[in-house]
Image (cartoon, rainbow, N blue to C red):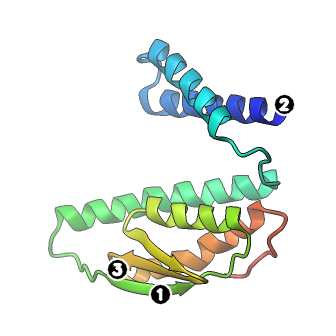
Amino acid sequence: MAERRNWALATGLFAFGFWWLLAGAYGLAYALVAALATGLLAAWLAPSRLPAMRLSGLLAFLRFFLSRSVLGGIDVSRRALQPDLPLDPGWLDYTCRLRTPPARNLFLLSISLMPGTLAADMNTDTVRVHLLDPAMRDDLPLLEQRISWVFPDEPELEP
């Protein structure tokens, strides 16, 4: 029970912090209600046992993910606003080296949240990824490596 309470508290605080980051002090009453609802929903949806995570690995993953998301978002925006920039969309079958379900789930979700990429399907160890540019494939092994640092049950991968 304490684990669910901690998960709900962490999720609610994260939601509140994210609101503060995006909107500042504007609408803090709404932010508190949204954070409370997010925390309650997280407690209800949380599995009975959360996977073990390394805090240092989680922080490294978040730093990597956020920096790549910002840089990728800028790149995708430039491509949308300047049609003469190269755009070479295509599909990639990427072999996933992560072994545990939490790590694989985080990998699939992270691919789809990064600008210019979309995880479309996964069969056994192969992830079908749509890319706006073939150069975006270079981030996949790095993303996979950072995720391997998060979970102690995963062997640490090299890019």
Q: Examine the image and state in which quarter residue 37 appears.
A: top right
Question: Disc count in the image?
Answer: 3
Q: Can residue 17 be seen in this view?
A: no
Residue type at numbered disc 2 = Ala
Precedes in sequence: disc 3 or disc 2: 2
Height in image: 62 above or below 33?
below
Q: Quadrant of the C terminus?
A: bottom right
From mark 2 to mark 1, how far is it between C-alphas?
Answer: 41 Å
Q: Which residue is drawn at 25% across and 79% down?
A: 87
Q: Residue at x 80, y 51 (%)?
A: 55
From mark 3 to mark 2, how far is it between C-alphas?
Answer: 45 Å
Element on which disc 2 rests: helix
Q: Which residue is drawn at 70% across and 28% down?
A: 9
Residue type at numbered disc 1 = Asp
From mark 1 to mark 3, how far is it between C-alphas?
Answer: 14 Å
Element on which disc 3 rests: loop
Q: Work out which residue is located at the far left of the displayed protein and give it.
A: 83
Residue type at numbered disc 3 = Asp
Residue 63: x and y in percent read 62, 55
**Front: mark 2 or 1:** 2
Q: Name the residue under label 3.
A: 133
Q: Residues within 10 Å of mark 3 (few under 14, many from 20)?
A: some
Contact check, label 1 and label 3, Cβ < 8 Å: no
Precedes in sequence: disc 1 or disc 3: 1
Q: Mark 1 points at which residue?
A: 93
Left or right: where 115 falls relative to 100: left
Q: Mark 2 points at which residue?
A: 2
Precedes in sequence: disc 2 or disc 1: 2
Left or right: where 45 falls relative to 140: right
Q: Which residue is drawn at 63% across and 40% down?
A: 45
Q: Examine the image and state in which quarter residue 102 appears.
A: bottom right
Question: Camera-side residue: 24 or 47?
Answer: 47
